[in-house]
Amino acid sequence: MEGLTDFITQYRWVDIYTFWFVLTDDAHQALQAHFGEWRKRGTPPIFSDSEVITVALIADTFFAGREDKTLSFIRQYHSDMFPKLPSCGRFNTRRRALNMITEQVRRVLVKQWGPQEDENGEYMPHRLIDSAPIPECTYTRAKESRTIEETWEPRDLYFGVSASKKTKVFGFRLHMDISLDQVVDRWLLAPASMHDSRGLGGMYEEEESLSRGALYDLCLLGDCAFNNPSWLASMRHKHGRGVQLCAIHAKTVLHPGPQSLGGW
């Protein structure tokens, strides 16, 4: 496992760690130069914020978010690259404290290296959209849960259903759009009761960030739950006919043909 790791990636871990840290640190410094220093007092930590974010992104990408596996793997095989790696508890505390900054770093990296352009520099407008329930606890214990406070929103909004599993859910629903290269572009964490069609409005609330001049191209591909004619009409009124929404029924079988994705 010190060399090529075919079970996860065909590149050397040393190269992955180095490349990811350089990109993360550059994005972190650029954000601080624009918004100012995050830390207002105290001595800078020995294990830098950029290193915490780098390890956190690697945990999410290669280890399904499992911090224990990630830290154990680094300590066992690559302790020389992160000699000041904190304990599991301390790392988790700092990772949660840096959640919002990590998301800003991710957005910078997506903007620089993400789904907007292909290897030839051509703009790629297609996005796959879907959602998934995130249960907070079992449905029968929902009334006893204190994680979701009444001060957020009415608790009734967090009761929903999982159509794929045909079960009731108490918690959240994650809405995402992903490029054809499987890079997450936008996401929205909403109460479980929010329908997929309503999630579109939340994800694209800042439409101007996608704009490429007066008009822009955007083709969303999803199942029939995302069918929202009013949202599509509003987007087209603001940005032109380049906005497309292909909400296809889950049981529909698409046969490949000469037409492009935009022609569905």
Image (cartoon, rainbow, N blue to C red):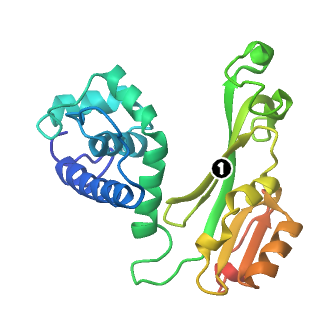
Q: Quadrant of residue 51?
A: top left
- Rendering coords of residue 159 (x, y %): 82, 31
Mark 1 is surrounded, within 10 Å at the Cα level, by few (under 14), some (14 to 19) or many (20 or more) other residues, namely: some
Q: Quadrant of residue 72?
A: top left
Q: Of 233 and 3, which appears nearest the observer?
A: 233
- Rendering coords of residue 13 (x, y %): 21, 47
Residue at image position (15%, 41%) is: 81
Please, what secondary structure does the residue beneath circle 1 have? strand
Q: Quadrant of the image for the C terminus?
A: bottom right
Residue at image position (82%, 39%) is: 193
Left or right: where 34 falls relative to 147: left
Q: Residue furthest right?
A: 230
Left or right: where 6 falls relative to 217: left
Residue at image position (28%, 54%) is: 25
Can residue 256 be seen in the rendering of this structure? no
Q: Quadrant of the image for the N terminus?
A: top left
Q: Of 203 and 244, which appears nearest the observer?
A: 203
- Rendering coords of residue 248 (x, y %): 79, 64
Left or right: where 133 falls relative to 47: right
Q: Residue furthest front?
A: 41
Left or right: where 62 falls relative to 72: right
All told, the count of numbered labels is 1
Q: Which residue is mark 1?
A: 188
Can residue 234 be seen in the rendering of this structure? yes
* Amino acid carrying mark 1 in the image: Leu
Q: Of 134 and 163, which appears nearest the observer?
A: 134
Image position of 18 with respect to 41: above or below = below
- Rendering coords of residue 178 (x, y %): 57, 60
